[in-house]
Image (cartoon, rainbow, N blue to C red):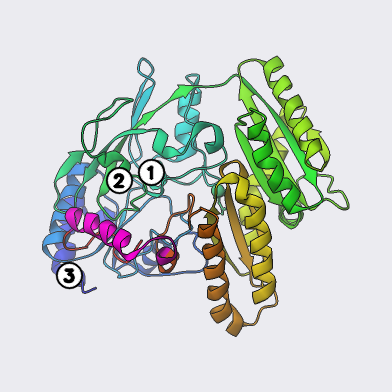
Amino acid sequence: MNFNTVSYSIIEEIKTIVGDNYVLTDSESINKYSHDETEDLRFYPEVVIKPNSVNQISKLLKLCNENNICVTPRGGGTGLSGGALPIYGGLLLSLENLNNILDIDERNLQATLEPGVITEVFMNAVSDKGLLYPVDPSSKGSCFIGGNVSHGSGGPRVVKYGTIREYILNLEVVLPSGEVIWTGANTLKYASGYNLTQLMIGSEGTLGIITKIVVKLIAKPVTDVLLMASFSTNEQACAAVSAIFRAGIVPSALEFMERRGVEWVIEYDHIPFDLKEGVNAFLMIEVDGNNLDTLFAEAEIINQVLEENGCTEVLFADTAAQKDDLWRIRRVMPVSVKSNSVYKEEDTVVPRAELPKLINGIKAIGNKYGFSSICYGHAGDGNLHINILKGLMSDADWNTKLKEGINEIFELTVSLGGTISGEHGIGLVQKEYMRIKYSELHLSLMRGIKGVFDPKGILNPGKIF
Ligand code: MLT
Ligand code: ZN
């Protein structure tokens, strides 16, 4: 792709749009915005811009479009697929200053907010009013809601409440031409032509810049029950997952963790947890609602299903502190695993009854290519995060054999009826595997959509395709 570099005169024009203080070219800023949370990848923007309004973004995009300058939008920088990496340089557009919660409409159970609001800040703001916004990725303390929308984010509660797709009603979007549209309506139903709101969700900043978000809220459940089940094998734990749903229970979270992941969390974060001999896998299961007796009855059914599926022990979290500790084990797992080894993370998802085949296949493929892995994730959704560890693999093998192994993992995932990302997105690092899931026809339809929104291809180039 051929883009123009950001010349001195363009920088001067940008300064007149956003003000001198919001145009950064110093090496510290360029460095800071050259990476997200995707492995150790770095790409340097030519200039970092921090606009303060929709109007400014509109003018910036118009200018870049006319001058063939590429623009990479960025939220909290917590992405795991390289979606916010400015791989062609150009302009890095940080949405961090658009960080206002504009309205919490308690009458309609809706809120309107800007993309730079930190997800947890928003969750707390609505929680104070007795409401729930349930989309809480592990990075909720630093990720932005705009990034969550752009990636179609999930998190542990998807299993009961659905992904972010269920909660976004309407979006204000600036198109590459600088024109501003609203994609839908602030309604719970939408049967009025193509649904551009849903198209924008998960488009990873390749179609337009999201500048306002209208979100659906729900009433906050009053209480929950949390339990942790131990198993001797990954396969048994994974098989128990679908059995729980077949027993008529819909947990508010159902997370899988491998033993080694828990070991590394304990080492990393010193969380008190009695890790017993012979236990190799865990399921963390939460049910929530408004009536504790009902929840205990559900927990009893879960207990029975777990026993029938080879569970060796069930730990009930009795106190709020115990619940916090268990949740911390799960939430800290990504960082503790990643801080222990050079790694490559994949985000597979299959129909949930296929999880045992997926986890066994991943381990077999690892043995074949010489890598180990730590898997954890949202088992209730059939969504497994695979952290492939370099361990003792030579650099040469890591750089060559690893790709073949990943290819096989994705081929297995697709053959089981799944796909190559459940919630982390495609971005830069998964795009070479898109051909495993999609035919050329399918990909050309997607490229056609990109071409309609962004004919010059200036927005987040080099991502998804
Ligand atoms: C998680 O479920 O913890 C997140 O998707 C983050 C990750 O897997 O790295
Ligand atoms: Zn996840």
Label number found at residue 188: none
Few, some or many residues within 10 Å of mark 3 (<14, 14–19, 20+): few
Q: Position of residue 132 (x, y in %)?
A: 49, 26
Percent of width and height locating residue 314: 81, 36
Q: Position of residue 110 (x, y in %)?
A: 36, 24
The answer to whether the residues at label 1 and label 2 have Cβ atoms under 8 Å apart is yes
Residue to which mark 2 is pinned? 200
Q: Is residue 453 magenta?
A: yes
First reached walking from the N terminus: tag 2 or tag 3: 3
Residue in the picture at 40% in, 49% down: 151
Q: Residues within 10 Å of mark 1 (few under 14, many from 20)?
A: many
Disc 2 secondary structure class: helix
Disc number at residue 8? 3
Q: Amino acid at mark 2?
A: Met
Residue 67 falls within the magenta-colored stretch: no
Q: Quadrant of residue 194?
A: top left
Distance (Cα) linking label 1 and label 2: 8 Å
Residue highlighted by disc 1: 149
Q: Residue furthest bottom?
A: 396
